Image (tube, rainbow, N blue to C red):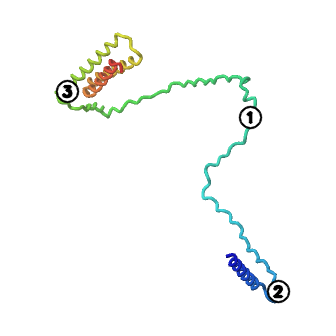
Amino acid sequence: MMETNQRVLRVLLAVVVLALAACTPRGPAKAAAPVTPAAPKPVPAPVPPPAPLSTPQTRVELPAPQPLDPAALDTDTATPEPPLVKPAPARRPPATVTVTPPPAAQPAEPPRPTIQELIPPLELKRLQDEVQNRRKEAAQILEQFGRRRATREQQLAITNIRNFLTLSDEAEKRNDIRQADALAERAQLLARDLQNGK
């Protein structure tokens, strides 16, 4: 086994020697012609980038820095500034207003009738009874609270209930019974909340 390895090495060595012998030049060596370097290509001048299409709008120019007086930071020696007093506005003489009477040729426009919902008599009676019952219940609850001292929140609720009762009464006088019922219902609900301590 060792002999075969040596033989292979000898054969390889012989092949390498023959290959090197084939590469060497035979005959007189020619002088190598001088190589002239190629002329460098001219480099074009750099082209400046194109101008931007728009200029940014965020350029800020700050004023030059101003020196700070160290005495300005000293709060112990600072004297209080007197309060600013606004001068009293100059009094103007009252303007004279001339009133021109309306021309007598135009007749006064008669008052327009108010538009009201037509409610059937049975429905009207039912709504009027409901309004009276709601007001009566709210008034009774208010009467109970009139005898004892109320908290601030209770006083506010009592004021709101009285306002709703007044508005309900005014709506009924205008013959707006549905509005009167809605306002009386609001007063009734607030009175119940007051009674239940909500």
Q: Amino acid at mark 1?
A: Leu
Residue shown at 33% from the left, 32% from the top? 104
Query: Image quarter for residue 105?
Result: top left
Element marked by disc 2: loop
Residue 106 visible: yes
Left or right of 98 in this view: 2? right
Residue type at the position of mark 2: Ala
Which comes before the other along the chain, label 3 or label 2? Answer: 2
Give the mark nearest the N terminus, 2 or 1: 2
Rendering quarter of residue 64: top right
Q: Which quadrant of the figure contains the N terminus?
A: bottom right
Classify mark 1: helix, strand or loop.
Answer: loop
User: Mark 2 = which residue?
Assistant: 29
Q: Residues within 10 Å of mark 1 (few under 14, many from 20)?
A: few
Residue 123 is marked as none
- Image location of residue 32, percent across then percent down: 81, 83
Report which residue position mark 1 lands on.
68
Which mark is in front, 3 or 2? 2
